[in-house]
Image (cartoon, coloured by chain):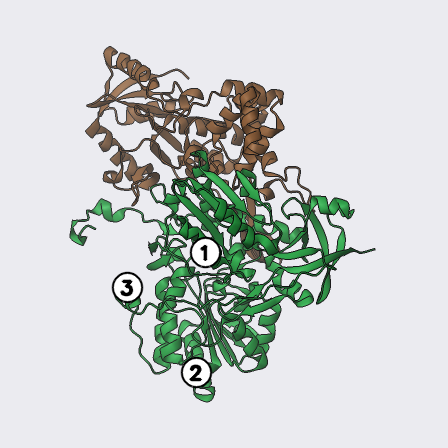
Chain colours: A brown, B green
């Protein structure tokens, strides 16, 4: 969808708008924690919102796919089993979400809405109910963190679509791009707070975008070559083995990744009463792909890692999901215990065909 | 630290992190009541990273294994009761036993899953109220006293030696620091009879037979040219194999050459627990308590957040039958709770105030980030219990805990190794890598329970890890049943072939220690440390027809 309108809003007015939103629905915004980290949290008082963050350690994905979610309850009454679906989907607005996370939500939505299979009747009711009640007010990045590489993944620092409103800091004002009907409705509702943006302000946004591109740090992940090599399947076994040796199987990457959405279900309760919950899961765990009776097609760590990268980069998924499975948020760089995060993996796959890299491998062993 | 009045409302509302209750690394994370968990990014240990156990920690909020109400055994069945009722019964029973048999007929077990303050109160309760010196904990298994160190320094190391410790499995955050150091050009030397994950990343991996491991380590350190910051990491294997005395030679040589030795604790608050006095006080150690109870000399046991049946199910059951009274205070419905006379719910680290001490010696504050919904916490229960027994205990303030610290400095004594026997070419070793499998903490989570129980469901009666090359020579395949013979007995186990065991080494997992020990012998008590050890045992294997 093209940009519907260019507006601008002053900094005080934005807070006024957020205050109004917080009264009516759940406002999610970055909040500073005790240790100084920013995290997306429900906000009642707008003075809690922090603007002093590059990217939060967690994407706001728990508001769409909670880490622990009750999906149904069951109860035995007079010998009959009563099963009830639990859908919790309050109206929410996420303020301050970055472009990479907007792309991440779009990617997950492709899977949960059934668009991936061309079967929208298979949509996940829990995820979609929350997605439909969600408004995204994104803030474009002007100072990327050293770990960021969204520019290599076509997911930022500015977006052209996917958001409801995209704000850009112009000093005194925020430039506000309206990206959807939902965003347009929001602007119309608070029309007294918004003004039309001037031509030079729209031009300034383009200039800012060019400036940001020069600020990216040392973690480029040029995914093009990786995409081709993973699709062709001609990556030497040593690369995966070398990556697997350093993997501690924490699963943190998958929990933090805006594009990861795997889950498992557990039943809690007894034969008379209880509930079924779904919780986040990671493909790096041994139990994830273990079959009943014990056989496991991906028993070793390197096989599991290979499968993960295959899902993220293979063309068959890119074709169906509309993009590859990395948005370059750089969170894996922070959370990977074995320092075999996405940029490292991509670099090792890319350099696997150079003779020197083989020699290096031999030395390590 | 800011004065209380200066803290603005925003500051006050800031979410506090909490500390992990699993291994000794002491990672911090933010935990939210809806089950959301975020590693603390600005914490010196977690740095935004957590292991599988840490990520699964939030499951404890929803675990069906939680003990929510006090239980009392009536007519051989555990029944729900009120808090006052349960504490009243426990007080009466303990008073009766104390007055009848004397304080030393009661044993008290503390826990590394409880805070320093709770362990302190338990110690006071035991020594001043019950009047017993039988105070210890099963969470002391494998602990050795060590100096303070700093994990962040490990990342700046130039040389790291791993002396028989599998940090990738048991101390993943430490492994992360080591891999971080490697990526900055450090050298890693692994001295281990097994091939642990870190062995594959090492510049040099020395794989001596278990009996010669410490000798090889001494030789290696003698010949090592120490450059920059060098560290030697060791952990509970050393103690479990009965090498606590011999390893001091290696450590002294290392210190003389400027290498800093680091001992990695297996459990969260192990150091904090021991420094307030939960260690053998000239009287029975934890293992001996069960043995004495089995003989009928110990009449009652008070257990706080400890679960002896995890490692010694048979011994504990036998001891339980002879006990007149068993009181368990635990946040989880453990096997010990199922056998208790009175069980009282406890709290987790994220539900209370207090402090915990990690492997480094770092003292960390606990905050009730998800406040407890229980009527009383452990300290309340112990203070009320002591009133019922006619004594008054002070509230465990920080100053009081600091004042009453009791350092544990055991005089180590050599343990004679099992003599080599030419008829038995293999060496049988205990492998603590699956240390969390089947434990109450692991079973209270969902994802970690699944992961840690794979090995239990694949091999419910245990397995024998054997080197692939050895297996090839002996024509053994995975799951072939073999008979393991030692000079003292034999047992049949399925084989798992891998490169993890070195040539001539047989590994069996720690979680079935008791089962193997009962059949094969080999376990004994190290009197100086007051804990059971399993010395490397000569063995041979016979293929069953």
Dot 1 or dot 2: first in sequence order is 2
Q: Is residue A97 left or right of residue B12?
A: right
Report the residue marked by disc 3: B398
Q: Is residue A249 above or below residue A108?
A: below
Cα–Cα gap, marks 2 and 3: 28 Å
Asked if marks 3 and 1 touch (Cβ < 8 Å), the reply is no
Q: Which chain does the numbered disc 2 sit on?
A: B
Q: Position of residue B414 (x, y in %)?
A: 52, 66
Report the residue marked by disc 1: B265
Dot 2 or dot 3: first in sequence order is 2
Q: Is residue B34 left or right of residue A49?
A: right
Q: Which mark is residue B422?
A: none
Q: Position of residue B366 (x, y in %)?
A: 34, 56
**Between B125 and B181, which is closer to the camera in this rendering?**
B181
> In terms of secondary structure, where does tag 1 sit?
loop
Dot 3 or dot 1: first in sequence order is 1
Q: Which chain does the numbered disc 1 sit on?
A: B
Q: Is residue B226 above or below residue A237?
A: below
> In terms of secondary structure, where does tag 2 sit?
helix
């Amino acid at each position: 969808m093209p940009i519907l309108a260019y507006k601008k809003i002053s900094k005080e007015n934005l807070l006024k708008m957020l205050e109004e939103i917080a009264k009516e629905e759940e406002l999610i915004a970055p909040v500073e924690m005790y240790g100084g980290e920013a995290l997306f949290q429900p906000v009642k008082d707008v003075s809690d919102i922090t603007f002093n963050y590059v990217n939060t350690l967690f994407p706001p994905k728990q508001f769409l796919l909670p880490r622990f979610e009750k999906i149904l309850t069951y109860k035995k009454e007079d010998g009959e089993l009563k099963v009830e679906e639990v859908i919790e989907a309050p109206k929410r607005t996420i303020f301050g979400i970055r472009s990479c996370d907007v792309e991440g939500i779009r990617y997950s939505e492709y899977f949960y809405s059934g668009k991936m299979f061309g079967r929208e009747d298979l949509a996940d009711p829990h995820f979609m109910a929350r997605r439909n009640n969600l408004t995204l007010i994104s803030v474009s990045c002007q100072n990327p963190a050293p770990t960021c590489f969204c520019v290599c993944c076509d997911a930022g620092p500015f977006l052209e679509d996917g958001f409801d409103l995209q704000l850009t800091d112009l000093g005194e004002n925020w430039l506000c791009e309206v990206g959807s009907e939902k965003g347009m409705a929001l602007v119309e509702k608070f029309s007294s707070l918004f003004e039309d943006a001037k031509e030079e302000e729209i031009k300034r946004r383009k200039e800012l975008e060019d400036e940001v591109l020069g600020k990216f740090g040392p973690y480029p992940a040029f995914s093009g070559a990786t995409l081709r090599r993973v699709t062709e399947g001609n990556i030497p076994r040593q690369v995966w083995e070398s990556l697997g040796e350093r993997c501690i199987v924490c699963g943190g990457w998958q929990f933090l990744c805006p594009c990861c959405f795997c889950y498992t279900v557990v039943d809690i309760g007894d034969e008379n009463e209880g509930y079924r919950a779904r919780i986040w899961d990671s493909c790096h765990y041994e139990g994830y792909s273990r079959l009943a009776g014990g056989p496991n097609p991906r028993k070793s760590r390197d096989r599991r890692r290979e499968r993960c990268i295959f899902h993220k980069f293979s063309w068959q998924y890119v074709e169906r999901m509309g993009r590859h499975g990395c948005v370059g948020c750089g969170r894996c760089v922070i959370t990977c215990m074995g320092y075999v995060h996405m940029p490292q993996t991509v670099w090792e796959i890319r350099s696997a065909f150079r003779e020197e890299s083989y020699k290096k491998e031999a030395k390590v062993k | 630290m800011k004065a209380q009045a200066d803290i603005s409302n925003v500051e006050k509302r800031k979410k506090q992190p909490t500390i992990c209750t699993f291994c000794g690394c002491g990672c911090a994370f933010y935990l939210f009541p809806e089950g959301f968990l975020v590693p603390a990014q600005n914490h010196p240990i977690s740095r935004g990273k957590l292991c599988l156990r840490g990520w699964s920690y939030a499951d404890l909020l929803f675990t069906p294994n939680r003990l929510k109400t006090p239980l009392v055994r009536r007519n051989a069945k555990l029944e729900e009761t009120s808090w006052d009722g349960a504490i009243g019964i426990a007080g009466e029973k303990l008073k009766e036993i104390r007055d009848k048999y004397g304080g030393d007929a009661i044993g008290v077990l503390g826990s590394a899953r409880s805070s320093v303050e709770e362990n302190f109160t338990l110690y006071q309760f035991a020594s001043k109220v019950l009047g017993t010196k039988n105070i210890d904990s099963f969470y002391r298994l494998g602990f050795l006293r060590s100096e303070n160190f700093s994990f962040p320094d490990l990342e700046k190391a130039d040389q790291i030696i791993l002396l028989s410790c599998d940090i990738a499995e048991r101390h993943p955050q430490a492994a992360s620091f080591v891999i971080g150091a490697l990526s900055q050009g450090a050298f890693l030397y692994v001295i281990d009879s097994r091939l642990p994950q870190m062995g594959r990343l090492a510049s040099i991996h020395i794989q001596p037979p278990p009996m010669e491991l410490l000798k090889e380590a001494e030789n290696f350190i003698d010949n090592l040219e120490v450059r920059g910051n060098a560290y030697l990491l060791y952990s509970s294997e050393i103690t479990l194999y009965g090498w606590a005395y011999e390893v001091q030679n290696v450590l002294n040589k290392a210190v003389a050459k400027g290498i800093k030795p680091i001992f990695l604790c297996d459990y969260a608050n192990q150091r904090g627990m021991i420094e307030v006095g939960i260690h053998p006080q000239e009287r029975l150690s934890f293992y001996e308590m069960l043995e004495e109870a089995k003989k009928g000399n110990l009449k009652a046991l008070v257990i706080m957040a400890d679960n002896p049946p995890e490692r010694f199910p048979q011994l504990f059951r036998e001891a339980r039958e002879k006990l007149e009274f068993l009181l368990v205070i635990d946040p989880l419905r453990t096997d010990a709770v199922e056998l208790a006379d009175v069980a009282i719910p406890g709290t987790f680290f994220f539900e209370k105030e207090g402090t915990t001490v990690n492997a480094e010696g770092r003292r960390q504050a606990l905050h009730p980030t998800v406040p407890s919904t229980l009527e009383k916490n452990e300290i309340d229960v112990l203070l009320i219990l002591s009133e019922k027994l006619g004594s008054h205990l002070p509230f465990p303030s920080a100053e009081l805990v600091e004042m009453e610290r009791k350092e544990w400095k055991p005089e180590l004594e050599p343990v004679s190794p099992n003599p080599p026997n030419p008829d038995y070419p293999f060496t049988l070793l205990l492998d603590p890598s699956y240390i969390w499998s089947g434990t109450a903490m692991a079973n209270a989570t969902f994802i970690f329970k699944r992961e840690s129980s794979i090995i239990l469901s694949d091999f419910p009666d245990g397995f024998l890890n054997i080197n692939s090359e050895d297996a090839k020579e002996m024509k053994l395949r995975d799951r072939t049943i073999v008979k393991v013979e030692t000079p003292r007995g034999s047992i049949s186990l399925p084989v798992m072939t891998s490169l993890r065991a070195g040539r001539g080494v047989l590994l069996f997992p720690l979680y079935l220690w008791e089962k193997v020990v009962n059949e094969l012998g080999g376990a004994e008590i190290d009197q100086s440390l007051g804990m059971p050890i399993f010395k490397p045992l000569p063995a041979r294997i016979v293929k069953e027809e």
